[in-house]
Amino acid sequence: MLTKLHLSTTKGIGAVGLIIAAASGIGGGLASVISPAKLQNAATSIDRTDEETQVIRITIIISLIITAICALMALFWAY
């Protein structure tokens, strides 16, 4: 959906467009991981609705670590 925008922007800044577009896709997937609605649905489906807050806290920490690693890798490879 945003690939054309990513590619045109990367031409202007001198980065590798494919890496930036891939990093954007990874970011979208990571955002989906920490979606409270998805976590709530998953907790409900396994009858553990009382553990949602704990799962969200752990998931956010893991997601932030993965996001930082992916961001550094994209920055390194894009230039």
Image (cartoon, helix red, strand yellow):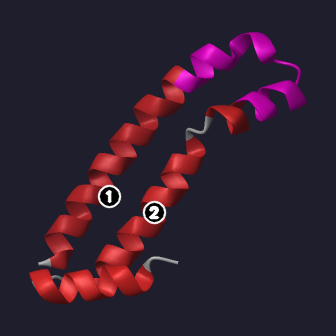
Instruction: Characterize the magenta stretch by its predominant secondary structure.
Output: helix
Vertical placement of residue 77 versus 28, above or below = below
Residue at horizontal 41%, vertical 30%? 61
Seen from this angle, which residue lies furthest top?
50
Vertical placement of residue 53 versus 15, above or below = above
The part of the image, by quadrant, that contains residue 12 is bottom left
Amino acid type at circle 2 is Ile
* CB within 8 Å, label 1 to label 2: yes
Q: Is residue 31 left or right of residue 50?
A: left
In this view, the residue in front, 35 or 62, is 35
The spot of residue 8 in percent (x, y) is 27, 88
The spot of residue 13 in percent (x, y) is 11, 80
Residue at horizontal 85%, vertical 25%? 44
Q: Which residue is mark 1?
A: 70
Q: Which residue is mark 2?
A: 26
> Could you classify mark 2 by the number of other residues whose Cα lies within 10 Å: few (under 14), some (14-19), or many (20 or more)?
some
Amino acid type at circle 1 is Cys
Which contiguous range is marked in magenta?
40-56
Dot 1: what SS?
helix
